[in-house]
Amino acid sequence: QVQLVESGGGLVQAGGSLRLSCAASGGTSSIYITGWFRQTPGAQREFVAAIRRTDAVTYYRDSVKGRFTISRDNAKNTVTLQMNSLKPEDTAVYYCAAKVTSGLSYYSGHYRDWGQGTQVTVSS
């Protein structure tokens, strides 16, 4: 199992920026894709962005394209989500997740390991 720890959440005004980090440990070589998901109360967890470990190919949900950037540092086993031009609708708990099988998936059930989540709140 891979252990994932998120950090960097907080409270920010609309239009501001936050940088989330996901630190992985234990069996990190098994990770094919690292994804970020988010969840609000009463809603299903939704895909935000993902990055392929080998070649850093990235994927984004449409509503964050041009505002969020995902990147990875394999030497440090970290994945970062830079969030700019934040909107109140970006408010959620953000989770980092590891997919240990090949192929991108937007479905949370295909990701095996999860962090504990970090709260992002964007005020209007």
Image (cartoon, helix red, strand yellow):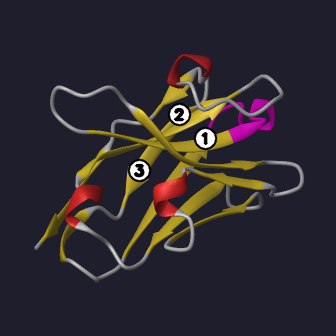
Q: Residue 122: give its label.
A: none
Q: Between 54 and 1, which is closer to the camera in this rendering? A: 54
Mark nearest the camera among 3 and 1 is: 3
Helix or strand or loop: what does disc 1 sit on? strand
Q: Which residue is mark 1?
A: 25
Rate crowding at label 1 as few (under 14), some (14 to 19) or many (20 or more) other CA atoms within 10 Å: some
Q: Position of residue 104 (x, y in %)?
A: 74, 34
Instruction: Report which residue position mark 3 lands on.
Output: 6
Amino acid type shown at disc 2: Gln
Furthest-top residue in view?
A: 109
Q: Are marks 1 and 2 in contact (CB under 8 Å)?
A: yes
SS for callout 2: strand
Task: Please tell me the numbered disc located at residue 3.
Answer: 2
Name, please, the residue furthest toward the front.
62
**Residue at left offset 42%, top offset 35%:** 46
Drawn side of residue 12 relative to residue 95, left or right? left
Q: CA distance from mark 3 to mark 1?
A: 12 Å
